[in-house]
């Protein structure tokens, strides 16, 4: 896309305006989730619009002086995309999770495959499933216009996911900038690092612990399944090849299974269904945990959460209120997730285009 000079000026004017508005905390929707959520850790609550953490102050200061507009510009792009597609927050949250679990939060999931090499995005668990890449591209294009070569794609993923969830009234978490983009992306690394939907409890605990996340954090992050969609193929065996009556998995509510079979006829593997249909399917709340307690979690990995004492206690605690304690717990767990094995200068690079290394 080419822009005329006047279009460019208009775009910059809009950005400056939006940055001014958002920077002053004027966007109620985005700020709400953080206020009563987890003790005011989100950057909107700081005067300068940036997070400050002593151990990372160099990166934060560098970034702040080099591109003060970045956060506002990214937020603008993300919010305008969500207005067109309310399913995007789910897509961006999952994009973040899958990026961080394979080679850390280094935007390796964004790199494209070529004729001789298959990249992460085409690996098991990501292919035909992870969405939202275009929004990251659009945010990158916008920040590159304002300040080229400063903001990494890995930081954009983190800011976009955070802003997206906050914008639908979910919790907000602190994003410290300064991640660098990785140079390597291998499809062969996804199966061993991403949890499959048929995983049982001990498998989940183990795969999360390899990323520094404990049992409770695994259960809390699974609460993400309060939003978004899945494809029927991933629950087909629970609907049609279970050991209960009518081939239904006995750990799935039979009336709910009957309903799901209508949306997911046998063989219609690419049909899409809502992970948590309550409240329209895109409301970020604790309903996921109520579903799991009622045997209405879609995957084996959801149903399995109530099969141990710690798991069941955590699910019950999170189900107890619609926002708390879920929002506080979720924000804290996200702050760990988004910092898994990040690259810091001089490691990695700042990509020019998120789909390609420089
Ligand atoms: C505990 C292990 C987990 C397993 C086994 C799992 C598995 C899955 C699967 C199979 C899907 C459906 C994908 C599709 O049909 O295209 C899905 C969707 C989703 N997952 Fe998970 N997930 C897990 C944990 C998480 C975590 C930790 C997060 C975020 C922090 C997350 C966020 C999401 C979201 C938001 C969606 C909906 C995506 C969309 O609408 O595009 N999941 N998950
Ligand atoms: C394909 O990607 C791999 C890994 O990034 C790279 O080593 C290789 O040179 C690329 N091949 C082509 C033909 O671009
Ligand atoms: C159904 O489940 C049985 C074991 O429970 C398995 O051997 C078989 O391959 C499954 N069939 C399909 C079509 O998934």
Image: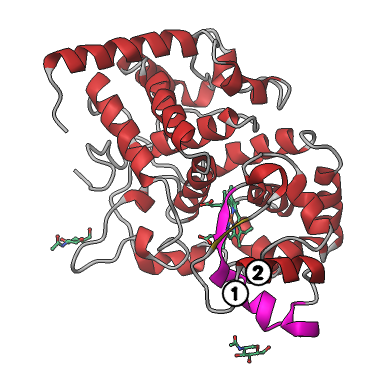
Left or right, residue 99 beside residue 208: left
115 and 165: which one is in front? 165
Q: Check contact, mark 2 vs mark 1: CB within 8 A.
A: yes
Q: Return the mark for residue 337.
A: none
On the image, the x and y values in percent for residue 12 come to 27, 14
Secondary structure of the residue carrying numbered label 1 = loop
Q: Is residue 341 above or below residue 321?
A: below
Q: Is residue 84 above or below residue 226?
A: above
Q: Going by the picture, which residue comes out furthest to the front?
A: 262
Secondary structure of the residue carrying numbered label 2 = helix
The residue lying at 37 percent from left, 46 percent from top is 133
On the image, the x and y values in percent for residue 265 come to 59, 74
Residue 321 visible, this angle: yes
250 and 36: which one is in front? 250
Q: Return the mark for residue 265.
A: 1
Measure the alpha-carbon separation of dots 2 and 1: 6 Å
Q: Return the mark for residue 262.
A: 2
The C terminus appears in which quarter of the rendering? top left
Residues shaded magenta: 228-249
The residue lying at 17 percent from left, 33 percent from top is 1
Task: Assess whether residue 235 is covered by the magenta stretch.
Answer: yes
The residue lying at 45 percent from left, 59 percent from top is 129
Where ligand 2 lies, by image quadrant?
A: bottom left
Beta carbon of the mark 1 residue lies under 8 A of ligand 3: no
The answer to which quarter of the image holds residue 118 is: bottom left
């Amino acid at each position: 896309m080419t822009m005329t000079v006047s279009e460019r000026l208009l775009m910059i004017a809009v950005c400056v305006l939006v940055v001014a508005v958002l920077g002053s905390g004027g966007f109620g929707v985005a700020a709400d989730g953080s206020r009563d959520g987890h003790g005011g850790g989100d950057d909107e609550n700081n005067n300068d619009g940036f997070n400050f953490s002593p151990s990372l102050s160099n990166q934060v200061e560098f970034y702040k002086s080099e591109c003060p507009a970045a956060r506002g510009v990214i937020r603008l792009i993300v919010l305008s995309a969500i207005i067109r597609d309310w399913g995007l927050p789910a897509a961006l949250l999952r994009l973040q999770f899958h990026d961080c679990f394979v080679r850390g939060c280094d935007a390796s999931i964004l790199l494209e495959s070529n004729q001789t090499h298959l990249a992460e995005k085409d690996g098991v668990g990501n292919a035909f499933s992870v969405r939202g890449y275009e929004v990251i591209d659009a945010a990158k294009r916008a920040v590159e216009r304002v300040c080229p070569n400063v903001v990494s794609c890995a930081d954009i993923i983190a800011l976009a996911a955070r802003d997206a969830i906050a914008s639908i009234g979910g919790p907000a978490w602190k994003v410290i900038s300064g991640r660098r983009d990785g140079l390597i992306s291998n499809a062969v690394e996804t199966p061993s690092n991403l949890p499959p939907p048929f995983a049982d409890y001990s498998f989940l605990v183990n795969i999360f612990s390899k990323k520094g996340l404990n049992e409770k954090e695994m259960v809390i992050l699974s609460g993400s399944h309060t939003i978004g969609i899945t494809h029927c193929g991933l629950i087909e065996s629970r609907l049609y090849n279970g050991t209960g009556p009518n081939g239904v998995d006995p750990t799935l509510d039979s009336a709910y299974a009957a309903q799901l079979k209508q949306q997911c006829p046998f063989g219609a593997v690419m049909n899409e269904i809502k992970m948590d249909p309550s409240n329209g399917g895109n409301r970020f709340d604790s309903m996921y945990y109520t579903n799991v307690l009622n045997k209405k979690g879609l995957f084996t990995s959801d149903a399995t959460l109530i099969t141990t004492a710690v798991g069941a206690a955590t699910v019950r605690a999170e189900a107890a209120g619609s926002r708390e304690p879920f929002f506080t717990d979720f924000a804290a767990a996200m702050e760990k997730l988004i910092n898994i094995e990040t690259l810091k200068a001089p490691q990695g690079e700042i990509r020019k285009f998120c789909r390609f290394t420089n």
